Amino acid sequence: MKSQLLLLCWLGAARIGFGAVPSVPAGFGFSGPEVFPIDYQISQLHAADLDGDELTDVVIVNNARSKITFLINQTGQTNAAKVRPSTKRELNELPPDARFRIETIASEKRIAALVVADLNSDQRPDLAYYGEPRELVVQSNRGGNGWSAPKRFAIDDGQLSPNALAVGDLNGDRLPDLVVLGESQLYLLAQRPDHTLAEPEKIPFSGIVRCVQLLDLDGDGRDDLLLSNWDTPNPLRFRLQTQTGQLGPEIDFAMPPIRAYCADDLDGDHKTEIITIAQNSGRAQIANFVSSGAEKLAGEFAAGQLQILPLNRTSKARRGILWADLNGDHRTDLLVAEPEHGQLSLRLQAADGALGAARAFASFAGVSDIVAADWNGDGRSEVFLLSADERQIGVTSYDTNDRLPFPEILQLDGKPLAIAVGRLSAQVRPTLAALLDQENQRILFLRSADGNIKTQKLSESFKSNPTTLMFHDADQDGLADLVILIPYERIKILLQVSGRDFKEIDIAPPGGVMEQPWLSASDVDGDGRPELLLGQKNFLRAVVLKSEKPAQGGTNTVWSFRVKEQINGTASDSRIAGAAPLRSSANRVAPIFLLDAERKSVTLCERDSGGVWQAVRNVPLPFSEFNGVQGIAMGGTNENTLALMGANAVGWLPLGGSVWEIKDLDSYETPVKDARLTDVVSGDLDGDDRKDLVFLETAKNYLDLVTLSRDGKLVPANRWQVFEERTFRSRRSDLFEPREAVIADFTGDRKNDLLIIVHDRVLLYPQE
């Protein structure tokens, strides 16, 4: 039961008549209800055997009294204690039945989320709760209705939501762990071998998350991570646990916005089904996760499974991200800077194309740029790091001890602004290039691996801070030039002249200056020479630097960009943020993929038989914060995947393979007129080892029961109105009623009963 319903009750007194359950010709029926008045503002309904007597007890949060209330089950006990009412009985308040004995413990906080689970492997359910004041509290069950002193964990950004806590084995050690949902990350409190909870470990997520669950989604016996955000185009996403106990990348699922969902193994196949209630129509749908072949895009390309890897969040405007083979195994690895922590996070690619667990290595703080190349010819890439915070450039490489040592600092005379590494010509090893600020004078700094350094003063008018420096043969003369991008300014080309200093040229970009300029390179006409790709709003242009002889009487050569091709996005409101060519055996000219940040998609563009570039297909993206794209190799040595980069997440889109999707199995619409299905819970009501559904209908205050048939269909079973209001409520509430439900055996007859919260009380419907 996961919904947007706020479980806070501010109702005034009312005269309520609770309806009896109608008899139906079904395989099961209910009597009652048995009524247990507690208090207003009760919520967080849980069922568990607290005292080990094999009877199911009830746990409820009572925020009106800052307490946790226990309904201790006394069914069948001949010497049961008398029920002690917690407050003076009001005029219209019903006396509690004798089935439960009420006990309480003080919480001294307003509890937003509660879980009841064995958190120390002693076979007794414990309590963990989060609320205001903001901290996580864990209390262990000592037996005999005794509880340990509260153990407090300082987590000050947890969400104040009933969906903010979850329990499950998230690291594969067969011990239940505890997860807390924060505003920008999860907190994992893993259970240690001594059965205590470890200190919180942060697990980032992309975008916004409003609900967390741990359960086996794919039937491999391992608990996975299910995240949701109700009213987005991709409300559900998961991270599957790997065989090594690590979490895989996020996989998002597109569907209409939902108001509630329930995730559970309904049919006993050890895989999870999803029951959703649509936000707008209120229609219920049952579905499951299945893997199928990727949809064909064009040629040999197919839209594979987009996978998103959340990064530890940074407040920096830029962070260094590098896709490159760092350990010499010919597989593309991922290196990410952690600017606030002075670390690098390295994930090595395995033979199957999966990225391994992150390993942290000490580095500079505030690393904004990372580039790599085999600088010294030893067969492994050297990694160059630029730290604006420390005003340093350093170099490191993956060593024989499987480590990235702390970077060796390169001596500079000035503050580094941008770096690049590349070959100045095909015959030489790569050179490190950097732009330096030397007392407000811009300097070009070049250094080779043997220590040879060359510097060149640039124009006195060059005062701005560049965002991009790239090696590219802009005039296609066989010598690599340096291209510099500066926001709101002309493009600066440092043209390589054999045997002389670089020639400094400023050229207006085609289409005008940009706030966030970017560039790429690709051979767009098949002549074997890559053109410079420059983005401009909803299109990009492929350009070549050309010179014109000076006019008669003139002395200065005129330089300009000649536009060879223009490639448009799919719509007038497209905002192209990057482009990546990817070779295909079906195309003489490599197709180009455009990252459309405005429309949240990747667009495949191809050159047709007439030589005209056309947008062929769009692949939607669930995440809008990517700002760069490049081609990489995953699971092989040829580029076959698009890598997507953002400040707080990276992603990769294989152009083939299989994909996860949600397969609809059946749907259900309640026959109650003008109804509103608000929430749903699951449990086996008819004893057939398949879990059934109870929908909470809140417009007319019904319980709507639906069974699951052997062929996976939803079959209406029974429904009844829980109450009807007989007098006007002076303090009216906007809360939906009934608001919570749980299915469990409370009578000890091995038949599951139905327990719900309505207003200030708990209602029990025993199964007949």
Image (tube, rainbow, N blue to C red):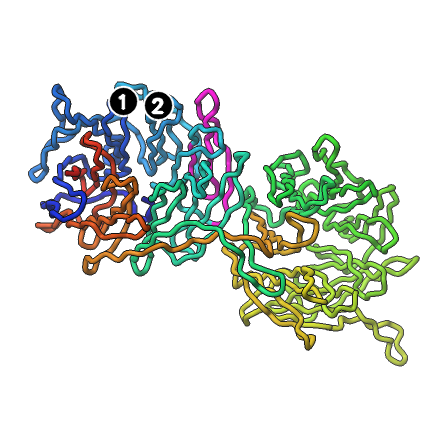
Within the magenta stretch, is there residue 193? yes
Q: What numbered label is drawn on residue 52?
A: 1
Q: Is residue 637 left or right of residue 36?
A: right
Give me the residue at 14% from left, 25% from top. 76
Choose the circle earlier in sequence order: 2 or 1: 1
Q: Is label 2 in a helix, a strand or a loop? A: loop
Instruction: Give the magenta part as a residue range.
Output: 178-207
Q: Which quarter shows the C terminus?
A: top left
Who is closer to the viewer here, 345 or 683? Answer: 683
Report if residue 733 is visible in the image.
Answer: no
Q: Is residue 761 left or right of residue 392?
A: left
The Cα atoms of the two marked residues, 2 and 1, are separated by 9 Å
Give me the residue at 80% from left, 40% from top. 411
Residue 230 vs 524, above or below: the answer is: above
Residue 561 found in image quarter: bottom right
Report if residue 615 is visible in the image.
Answer: yes
Contact, mark 2 vs mark 1 (Cβ under 8 Å): yes
Q: Which quarter shows the N terminus?
A: top left
Residue ranking furthest to the right: 499
Q: How far across and how far down the image is residue 313, in percent?
A: 54, 44
Who is closer to the viewer here, 127 or 281? Answer: 281
Within the magenta stretch, is there residue 426? no
- What amino acid is labelled 2 in the image? Gln
Q: What numbered label is drawn on residue 123?
A: 2
- What amino acid is labelled 1 in the image? Gly
Q: Is label 1 in a helix, a strand or a loop? A: loop
Q: How far across and how far down the image is residue 402, in percent?
A: 70, 33
Around disc 1, counting alpha carbons within 10 Å, would you say few (fewer than 14), some (14 to 19), or many (20 or more)?
some
Q: How far across and how far down the image is residue 478, in percent?
A: 85, 62
Q: How far across and how far down the image is residue 575, in percent?
A: 57, 65
Q: What numbered label is drawn on residue 727?
A: none
Around disc 2, counting alpha carbons within 10 Å, would you say few (fewer than 14), some (14 to 19), or many (20 or more)?
few
